[in-house]
Amino acid sequence: MATVVDKASGKRGGQYKSAAALRHPEKQRNSDSAILKKPEWLRVKAPGSPVYNETKRIVGYDNLVTVCEEAACPNIGTCWSKKHATMMIMGDTCTRACAFCYVKTGLPNALDVHEPNHVANAVARLELEHVVITSVDRDDLADGGAEHFARVIRAVRAKTPQTTIEVLTPDFLRKEGAAEVVIDAKPDLFNHNLETVPRLYLSIRPGARYYNSLRLLEKVKEHDPEQLTKSGLMVGLGESRDEVLQVMDDLRAAHVDFLTIGQYLQPTRKHAPIDRFVTPDEFKAYEKMAYAKGFLMLSATPLTRSSYLAGVDFAKLRAARQKKMSNTSA
Ligand code: SF4
């Protein structure tokens, strides 16, 4: 029997449960952490421009899910005003329970076989030059959803061959051969976020393993040396500067081309608390260090997210690689 849930009120079958309890049942045992007031450099305008509303209408056509909404991204007003929506495939429910993430957790539904075409149609309607496709973790699927990712990439290629495609994948932990399926579908950019420094994995990303994520990025380059790769970190979770620099070295050892670094924001009182707000000057210093370590491209600002300004940054990344190749062959 289907249960109708009113998401806003959390009203369920005559009983009342908080929306947070329905969204993250496993976090309800956590003690409450006060949500810190944001500094001025993290304040954003409320969304609502006509183009924003148009974007909302288009992604709503086939009940598509976006990480912009599901992760309560602070950049949604800016991005959707440019029609930049990031598709989240394989449903709105994640099988992991990371301490930083607002995406709903629980048992997901079966895959929607029509989703690849629906995503391709939305990309065409939005007239995207560059699309970012991400997903929830699907540990329940034998291949972690790798084949579904590949189908979405192929559907977008067929519908809008001019659109460049960036994938932001899960870690495919214990799914032998899964990453290769996605790499063979030839996205233009393969992204997998490390999210935080290794010391904090147990508390922040307990279902994942730092070296598995790093190895995934390394494997992408081994399997296809031409494939551009990207990873991302959140800061403000309690990591030290030296730990961030060590992660940069690890990523360069795995030949990762592009690194994003942004401020962690606490979605609810039950999520991991913010340790501190990293200042814009500290972000600039990280950017400088990362370029010195050999990354082709860096985005490090308080509001940087993996998919923020992804199309513009992808063009810069390609240009940087071209320049490097011409310098090498000169
Ligand atoms: S930064 Fe990414 S997730 Fe956030 S609104 Fe923009 S496209 Fe969506």
Image (cartoon, rainbow, N blue to C red):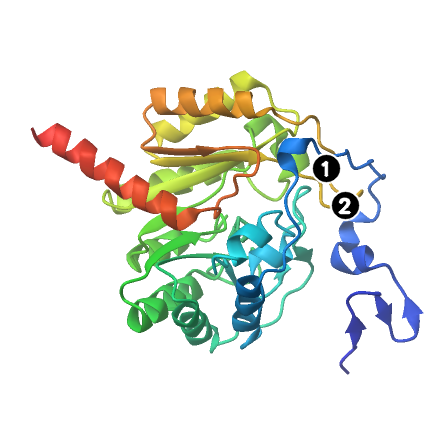
Query: Tag 2, which secondary structure?
Result: loop
Q: Which residue position holds label 1?
A: 272
Q: The disc labelled 2 sits on which kind of residue?
A: Thr
How dense is the environment of label 2, judged by Cα within 10 Å: few (below 14), some, or many (20 and up)? some
Using the image as rendered, state which of residue 212 and residue 89 is in the foreground. Answer: 89
**Residue 182 position (above or below residue 306):** below
Residue occupying image coordinates x 51% and y 23%: 244
- The residue most toward the bottom is 1
- The residue most toward the front is 50
Residue 69 placement, left or right of 51: right
Q: How far apart are marks 2 and 1 (CA)?
A: 8 Å
Residue occupying image coordinates x 13% and y 29%: 328
Q: The disc labelled 1 sits on which kind of residue?
A: Ala
Q: In which quarter of the image is residue 133?
A: bottom left
Q: Are marks 2 and 1 in contact (CB under 8 Å)?
A: no
Label of residue 268 in the image: 2
Using the image as rendered, state which of residue 60 and residue 240 is in the foreground. Answer: 60
Residue 267 placement, left or right of 61: right
How dense is the environment of label 1, judged by Cα within 10 Å: few (below 14), some, or many (20 and up)? many
Q: Quadrant of residue 56?
A: bottom right
**Residue 231 position (above or below residue 89):** above
- Residue 272, position in %: x, y? 72, 37
- Residue 101, position in %: x, y? 65, 47
- The residue most toward the top is 242
The CB of the residue at mark 2 lies under 8 Å from ligand 1: no
Residue occupying image coordinates x 39% and y 62%: 128
